[in-house]
Image: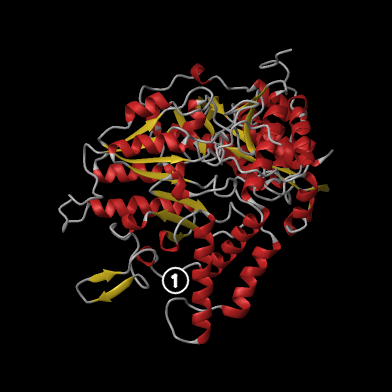
Amino acid sequence: MTMVSTPAWGDAQVSALDDDEVRRIRNDFPVLEQEINGKPLVYLDSGATSQNPRSVLEAEQEFYEQRNSAVHRGAHHLAVEATDAFEDARATVARFVGVQDDELIWTANATAGLNLLAYSLSNASVDRAAGGTGRFALKPGDEVLVTEMEHHANLIPWQELCRRTGATLKYIPIDDAGALRLEEAARLITARTRILAFTHTSNVLGNINPVDVLVRMAREVGALVVLDACQSAPHLPLDFKALDVDFAVFSGHKMLGPTGIGAVYGRSELLNAMPPFLTGGSMITTVTMEEARYLPAPQRFEAGTQPISQAVALAAAANYLSETGMHRIALREAELGQKLVTGLSAIDGVRVLGPGPGEERTGLAAFDVAGVHAHDVGQYLDNLGIAVRVGHHCAQPLHRRLGLSATTRASTYLYTTSEEVDMLVEAVAQVRPYFGVTAAGAAS
Amino acid sequence: MSGLDSLYQQLILEHSKARSGGDLAKLPAAADAGRGDAGQAGTGQSHQLNPVCGDEITLRLSLGADGDGQTVTEIHWDGDGCAISMASASILSEMAPGMSPVSLRHTIDHFRELMRSRGKLEADEELLQDAAALAGVAKYPARVKCAMLAWVAAEDALRQAEASQGVSRPL
């Protein structure tokens, strides 16, 4: 049962996780067992970072206790075991997002992944040997297109790339409800567009962008498509091949994994034609005092010792998610997202950003409480043990566009109970009375 | 008083709404004040931003002659932020006029020390007056910057005001 009419993640005949299953899932997450201010922790900040199940924590510990060693070097037993664990982890995570093993590059996080892409293109643009005319070189007159709803991580690397190369950064605007203006996208995607970078699901709005429509427009003009999957990889079943994007990035810590690990997906043919970003050990074939030759992807983009235990732990996270079922998680979160938007919108003076009740939404909601700053809302909720994110959520341009400087965001995950969402909604309803705000924004 | 009520005391909530001094236009700045160096002698301006939450304040402070020395004559500001940062600016702009630069700096120093004490220091209520009500903020490290925003702006604006008169002070 779901309230979402046309899930973007297909027509699988599965049901949402139910409350009993969620209660069992919670037992796997030690951090959720604690109290804050004498009240049970209600963790509604998974959009910022998710919690880790025991299997993830144990996988990392087991690696250090049994197999810790450098990978892809050394012939001793532990080195072989560590290399196997590291590459098995890559295969697991690659399968989780529907790509080949050699198309998945480890990075520190999604931000590092986007910078890797931007800097590789930047390197291509200043390559004197290629005379700045290589396939990936950007030059004045070229355009990089993003959207108005991007996280700063999918905006600033492109701003900097354009500044360095003389290319022009443009953006697809949103409407007042937060949806991309596709008629503007059609106008803005032209033969000058070299890169189209956009988020799959907004970390503020909770909408799901029409990847297929945008990819089709980009294909018509030969632009490369970069998908920020940081908020979708943890919450929606993903298949980057089916989505037909050229590149995608995501972070481990938002999908039950540890911090310090994320990944870039790139089509094999592209990755092997692009210049490296970081150079050094582990990514070469032969090195002379004058020059070096590079290994194919993924090693081509993995200079230096990699986050090995983190990769192993991220694979454990991907397995945990797969075993639970990404379709079921997505359906569950869609229900919670509806519960959030419906409950919060009904409160006097509360404005939820993005899709309204009944419209497709992920399991998060950012909202404004008229007359009360988001920081104060967050403080009030924290006093009740409810953890939410407050501020601009690394999306200042989006907030500015919507006439706000800061909002409060509640974001759910597979361990969030319906009762927790109810508690949040009831608490938010008390915020304006507590701060003595009754006038502005009061409808009745 | 619960933790939350000691943070959001009635006085703070009232100041956050009343916003004394929250009328920047009343104290004209020189045309190039946007650069931080208010051209009008004796007036200084500072813009402070808390990048974590987006709290923002632009504060102007003017100095006037008072006998042999000088005193702060007016503080006006314009800002956007949480109840703590707005109340803090309101309280400061009520208490600072009449203070000498030395006394204002002394008060700011004590306030900063109090805010950074994690609740271990007692407020000097005689010195801090209404600002002593903000003492509860010290127990919430994430909010200290909110409370400090206007005070940091006042400290900087004071420096600008003195610089505009040719008074140089060590930073």
User: In the drawing, does residue A221 fall left or right of residue B146?
Assistant: left
Q: Looking at the image, is A436 positioned above or below residue A150?
A: above
Q: Looking at the image, is A54 positioned above or below residue A195?
A: below
**Picture quadrant of residue A166:** top left
Which residue is outermost to the bottom? A76
Residue A134 horizontal/vertical position (percent):
20, 52
In the rendered image, which residue does mark 1 sit on?
A305
* Residue in the foreground of this view, choosing between B102 and A218: A218
Residue A420 horizontal/vertical position (percent):
77, 41
**Picture quadrant of residue A344:** top right
Identity, as a three-letter code, of the amino acid under mark 1: Thr
Query: Can residue B127 be spotted in the picture?
Result: no
Q: How many marks?
A: 1
Residue A62 horizontal/vertical position (percent):
64, 74
> Residue under mark 1: which chain is it in?
A
* Residue in the foreground of this view, choosing between A431 and B119: A431
User: In the drawing, does residue A36 fall left or right of residue A397?
Assistant: right
User: In the drawing, does residue A356 fall left or right of residue B45?
Assistant: right
